[in-house]
Amino acid sequence: MAEIVDSGNLSGVLDSALDAGGGLLRLTPTWVPRAFLHPGKRIRLNPKHYYSYGAERGGIDERWFASTTEAANDGRVWHEGLSFCSFEGKNFLLRDAVSENGKRLIGEGMFEKYDRWPVYSKFFDNMGPIPHHMHQSQADAKLVGQEGKPESYYFPPQYNNCDNNFPYTFMGLEPGTTKDELRACLANWGNGENGILDLSKAYRLKRGTGWLIPPGVLHAPGSLCTYEPQWGSDVFGMFQNIVEGRYVPWELLVKDMPEEKHQDLDFIIGQLDWEKNIDPSYKDSNYLEPIVADSGDGWEDKWIVYGTVDDDQLFSSKELTLQPGAKMTLKDPGASGWITVQGKGTMGKLDLQTPVMIDFGQETEDEIFITHEAATGGVEVENTGSEPLVGLRYFGPDTFGSVPAVGDYRK
């Protein structure tokens, strides 16, 4: 097993890793279980290892990328949700590395403003749908000492060889829905299925497309494996009480709300952004299709997550594809977390290889943190395999001077 280097002894190892990698850091897989969900079994984890945290913790249905955000799970292990960097038999937390040398890793401006890498992404992979739920706004999360969580979706074809049980996502509420109708659903929590989906609309999920999900908007993710760039928080409130016959306890509705408000239905409903939930043009306001950002001889770079949340550029993402034998210099204005989803090749001095099956605890060659230093200086990417080399990378807030607006894919 690799030696764990703590924050107090990190300086020399981090400098050596950054210098050896030309500003790139190799990351190891970060697996997260959810006790109330059923794994979709497409994130390349060895089937023998879905319950490696213990059966009582639930199956592993998520892999987090370049994360400095802890998973808010009961009974969690000390590093749950946190990404480790790997260098010459030593592992250290990306969170500690950013604290040690934030200017080099994420850029002086972002480090001074946030004092951390404030975003993360994940593969979210389930056999069926999850409860209709929302993530709190910044103001509402602050009431319990947390941060809000806007997020986004992209459905990578390489990780969606099958649809699983329900490739549709309910989003928002039907226009005309009243707060009294929603209040009745919550009041019926203990009396059988509360019927909240009767107030919503489901959209069929399409591979190679995505969505923006603002805070305070209800959504019940469907069964396509989803790549999710999002803000660095794990707050949520479940508004649906029974999903596929599984009961959702009231505690998962109110876990990120002030304790004295746990039975206050008006307060709970008040955490929703009502106008965005009943937006009659919800799809036009939130649906994303790829937009070519740049291209060259044998390669193409596409925006897959773009747009703003309440006029703020909080996160964005691109998909880079290189045909066999192609190479290019990847240059971005800021740091990013990279995951390889198809093919093999190299990025700078590091190998890239998409795994077929990963043992729990095994290190892989598919994930990299591209530091601000490497991104702004430029790093060469080459496809050394016989199929396309495809990688997804996500960025933090205000990385770009501008990003496409939602709906620009139509232009």
Image (cartoon, grey):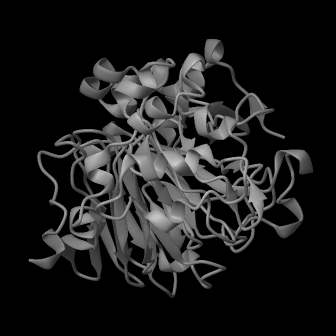
The quarter of the picture where the N terminus appears is top right
Please state the horizontal and vertical placement of residue 213, each as a whole percent of the image: 37, 54
Where residue 236 sits, quadrant-wise, is top right
Please state the horizontal and vertical placement of residue 89, each as a whole percent of the image: 73, 39
Count of marks, rendered view: 0
Q: Is residue 43 visible?
A: yes
Q: Is residue 343 visible?
A: no
Please state the horizontal and vertical placement of residue 310, each as a whole percent of the image: 21, 42
Q: For the view shown, which residue lies furthest in the bottom direction?
A: 386
Q: Is residue 239 left or right of residue 137?
A: right
Q: Is residue 5 left or right of residue 214?
A: right
Name the residue located 37 percent from the left edge and 77 percent from the top edge.
Answer: 322
Q: Is residue 83 above or below residue 239?
A: above
Closer to us: 221 or 14 = 221
Q: Is residue 258 above or below residue 148?
A: above
Please state the horizontal and vertical placement of residue 177, each as a whole percent of the image: 35, 58
Name the residue located 77 percent from the left edge and 59 percent from the top edge.
Answer: 246
Q: Is residue 394 above or below residue 70?
A: below
Q: For the view shown, which residue lies furthest in the top direction?
A: 8
Q: Is residue 236 left or right of residue 291?
A: right
Name the residue located 38 percent from the left edge and 52 percent from the top edge.
Answer: 394
The quarter of the picture where the C terminus appears is bottom left
Q: Is residue 312 left or right of residue 63?
A: left
Name the residue located 44 percent from the left edge and 32 percent from the top edge.
Answer: 266
Closer to us: 304 or 205 = 205
